[in-house]
Amino acid sequence: MPHSRYQNVKEFHGGEVPDQVRVSEPTVWFNPHLLPALRALEGNELQVSEVMEAADRWRRFAPLLSRLFPDVGEVEGRIDSPLLPLSSELSMRVTENLPQTVLVKADHALPLTGTIKARGGVYEVLVYAEELALRERIVGPGIGYSILADEAARSLFAQHTLLVGSTGNLGFSVGMIGRALGFNVEVHMSSDAKEWKKERLRRIGVQVVEHEADYSVAVAGARHSASKRGFCHFIDDENSRLLFFGYSAAALDLASQIKNAGIEVSERSPFAVFLPCGVGGAPGGVAFGLKAIFGDAVQCVFVEPVASPCMLVQLASGIERSVSVYDFGLDNKTAADGLAVPQASMLVARAMQPLVHAVATVSDDSLFFWVKTLFEEAGMKLEPSAASGFASVASYLRGLKAQGAQLPSACIVWTTGGSLLPVKEFEKILARAGM
């Protein structure tokens, strides 16, 4: 059964917030502020050079990750996921019978955390550990970073606390690497966070602070807690350049995989990437890295729940001031807990305004449909938020056709979490999906 049963998508072209957004109706907003990539990147407050710096840092950290987590040794300390082709039959279902190649960048199976948030959260913690170790001369010329797993470094890190606000997956990524290095970790969780995600953190020794409010309040709580103490580092999901560029390095890995897969990419034959979007750091970082590498040969599409389209309303309203989904009569209530964010990162919104091609919104019903379909037909174990890209491909392609624009030669759906879902939790998701 095609997922259009759940969507009934209307495409929208223009600069103001679409009426469909205000009534929680799925839509596609095509960005009128899109610029040629070279021009957009030259005028950006974020620098392309920082993508390469992040990639270099990841390489320095690889021996440490291999030592801390021996079971990722098969990938030599690299945090990356496979690029998986979908069958022709399933690709046709995703595109609703348009003959486009569909592949999956499988961050739902990412080593260590099973979520894309490891790319940013783990990276920022490692950078902070590096800064502390350099200051205390634990590392230096000729000293490999695997020494940061030794007792001297762990004793240093134990004097410091990491703080972050999260709906779940970023908190777990920070908690997992932070505790492995010996840091104290405090994670402020929003009301949208699942109980099992809180318990998972507590089991590894993380202090969980619960908030009876949304993601923005949880972030504010972590920020306030950090302001009252010394020897701490607040990981600011709304404004962190380190998170952003930790994510951006993933574009280099994807570029190698695209080449190895024999996919021809050019401005005349572009590919499209569909990225689930919450506050914006992960999709923004990945999109920035992809644009730095491929320029106008890649089309970046952000995907949000109909109840929480914070990036869409921000970009459509302009970047002069921050706006919230609540300003447009939306309630920010969605089964996609990782995307339940009322306000977009202004850092990301400013960076993405000239770079993102479109923002699509999708219904919760469509997320569960695709969780069920991908599990049954491809064996993928996804959280609802991780399935959002699949629910948006056909509507985006239809929108391009309506404009008379060239369709991408390939569509890559970026999944974001799911492989570490407890069995009982995944069974609940499948039950809601009707299995």
Image (cartoon, rainbow, N blue to C red):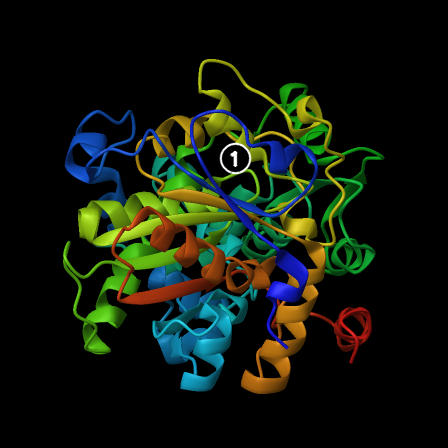
Q: Quadrant of residue 412?
A: bottom left
Position of residue 74 relative to residue 94, above or below, is below
Q: Is residue 311 above or below residue 360?
A: above
Q: Residue at x 14, y 57 (%)?
A: 268
Position of 104 with respect to 52 (left or right) is right
State whether residue 366 is above or below residue 52: below
Secondary structure at badge 1 equals helix
Q: How many marks?
A: 1
Q: Residue furthest top?
A: 320
Amino acid type indicated by mark 1:
Met
Q: Quadrant of the C terminus?
A: bottom right
Question: How far from the left and from the top, in percent, is residue 232?
Answer: 58, 31
Q: Is residue 166 visible?
A: yes
Determine the image quadrant of residue 185: top right
Query: Which residue extends farthest right?
Result: 212
> Which residue is pictured at 44% across the width and 20% down the height?
319
**Residue 339 image position (x, y, % from top left):** 62, 47
What residue is rendered at 55% in x and 32% in y?
18
Whether residue 383 is visible to the viewer of this picture, yes or no, is: no
Which quadrant: the N terminus? bottom right
* Nearest to the observer: residue 215 or residue 172: 215
Q: Name the residue carrying label 1.
A: 311
In the foreground, 217 or 306: 306
Q: Between 156 and 20, which is closer to the camera in this rendering?
A: 20
Q: In the rendered view, does 136 fall on the left or right side of 304?
A: left
Could you say where residue 417 lies in the image, as x and y percent from the top left? 58, 63
**Residue 380 image offset from top left, x and y in percent:** 57, 78
Q: Is residue 426 left or right of residue 14?
A: right
